[in-house]
Image: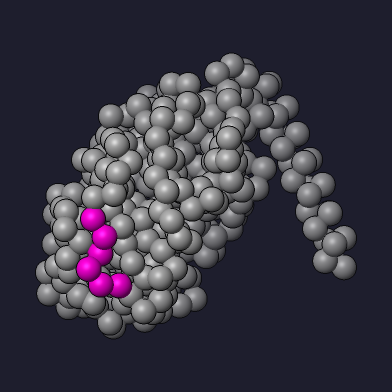
Amino acid sequence: MATLRDAAENVIDLLRWRRNRIRALLSGHKSVVLHTITDIYPRVSFLPDNEHFVGRCYDDTVRKWRISDGREVGKVNHGSLMTAVAVSGDGKTIASGDQDGKVVFWSTDTCEKLAESQGKHSHLVRSLAFAPDSQRVASGSDDGSIIVWNALTGGIVTGPFRDHKSWVNSLAFSPAGDKIASCGYFDFGGAQIWDSSSGEEILEIPAFAPVVWSPDGSQLICGTDNGTIEFIDSSNGARLATWRGHEGAIYSISVFQGGTWLASASVDHTVRLWSTSSHQQLASLDHPNGVYDVSVSPDGRYLASVGFKAYIWRLSGVDPTIQMGRIRLSISTCEQGWSSQDCFG
């Protein structure tokens, strides 16, 4: 029965993709997908130069690509089973975590090892996040602990925090760097806010994941398993607004640095762009499968989405700060400038 169900789902995926192709071609929109990369995990991160992006591959490497032509220009070999990756805000450092519970720091430019954590979690590293100053990185583990490390020396700055309600699936520093938001999966403990210096829990918000901060730090923006986006007051946990549009669980949210729009990724096969002022959906980027990660470049010109493959989109044709209508684009609209490669090439 499982085989028949899988086959039926594959047929439905194909029919949906062909329908979207016809819709996109009739709408007259130009190609927006620049590159497709296989054998890559969520997540993909853009560097602050807006010219490169990095991603974690299935062969336990972190690779760096150039946006303009999709060419690989750097590779980090972690050396053991890698489970999490993050890039510093200044673009100079990559942090990688592994199944042994340790964190390693690498130069983004040279791909050389800079430092290794002086200590480790008792279980694998599930999540990593840099502080805005790029000097600290927080790691979350399946053992339910959070540790803040010095990204230059590998020493422990704070922690471990041991009161997390479940394994730590994602982490995010507040824009000021004084707080950390953490969350498990949807059914395991919701989100918590911590003082990044003392490790004390400040606030608990049940039943939300993933969690990101608004640019001014006043709100938490949360995805839910029913496809809504919730805006939460970060000082008291009060719900401020609810957006509806997705038809399945939301696994990732990325806010444009300018704060005017955000992107959400869902198992419903779409990435959706939203205006933060009007709360209206601006565009829907269709995928052949569920999408588990989304990232927006600092200048807002590019978007990376990752499901079974990673797609790099050019957003200039659907600039949400200018074009306020509902736009629907499919991966199959890509024509010129498209490249496809894998992490083992």
Locate residue 54: give its quadrant: top left
Residue 32 or 16: which is nearer the viewer? 32
Q: Residue at x 41, y 58 (%)?
A: 84
Is residue 239 placed above or below 133 in the rendered structure?
below
- Asked if residue 175 shows in the view, the reply is no
Which quarter of the figure is the N terminus placed in? Answer: bottom right
Q: Estimate the x, y position of residue 324 in percent, counting from the top left.
A: 43, 30
Residue 52, image x and y in percent? 37, 31
Side of 24 where 236 appears, left or right: left
Q: How many marks?
A: 0
Q: How is the image coloured?
A: one colour
* 256 part of magenta stretch: no
Q: Residue at x 14, y 67 (%)?
A: 157
Q: Quadrant of residue 205?
A: bottom left
| 333 relative position to 126: left or right | right
Q: Between 275 and 135, which is closer to the camera in this rendering? A: 135
- The C terminus lies in quadrant: top right
For residue 92, which quarter of the picture? top left
Question: Can you say whether 31 is above or below 6 in the image?
Answer: above
Residue under the image location 75 percent in, 34 percent down: 18
What is the x, y in percent for residue 236? 21, 71
Observer-nearest residue: 82 or 14? 82
Residue 259 in picture, x, y percent from top left = 27, 41
The reply to whether residue 103 is in sight is yes
Figure check: 34 above or below 241: above
Q: Which residues are magenta?
A: 115-120
Horizontal placement of 37 versus 116: left or right?
A: right
Q: Please tell me which residue lies in front, 171 or 232.
A: 171
Secondary structure of the magenta portion, mostly? loop
Q: Residue at x 59, y 16 (%)?
A: 336
